[in-house]
Amino acid sequence: MIQIEKKWIGDRNNCQNLGPVTGSSRLTFANFRGLFILTGVASTSSLL
């Protein structure tokens, strides 16, 4: 089992730190604006 884990996941002790960890940005309504517009247009056109 350990051999399979090392093959697929790799050696956890051999992890390279390639720089500082970047923070994640928060998801807001503006991130999904296009999706909401597309959904609204599709819903409205299906009702007509």
Image (spheres, rainbow, N blue to C red):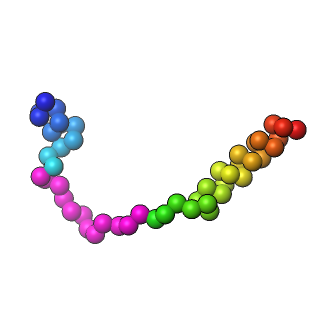
Residue farthest top in this picture: 1
Q: In the rendered image of this protein, does residue 7 appear above or below residue 21?
A: above
Return the x and y of residue 24 as percentages of the image width and height.
Answer: 41, 63
- Residue most toward the bottom? 20
Q: Is residue 23 magenta?
A: yes
Residue extent of the magenta highlight: 13-24
**Which image quarter: residue 31?**
bottom right
Q: Is residue 45 left or right of residue 35?
A: right
6 relative to 30, above or below = above
3 to the left or right of 27: left
Tell which of 10 and 32 is nearer to you: 32
Point out the image quarter for the C terminus.
top right
Residue in view at x 62 percent, y 62 percent: 30
Q: Position of residue 10 (x, y in %)?
A: 18, 43
Residue at 71% across / 48% down in the picture?
38
Query: Position of 30 compared to 38: left or right?
Result: left
Residue 39 drawn at (x, y percent): 71, 46
Per the image, is 43 magenta?
Answer: no
Magenta-drawn stretch, dominant element (helix, strand or loop) = loop
Q: Quadrant of the N terminus?
A: top left
Residue 41 x %, y %: 77, 47
Compare residues 30 and 16 and report the one nearer the observer.
Answer: 30
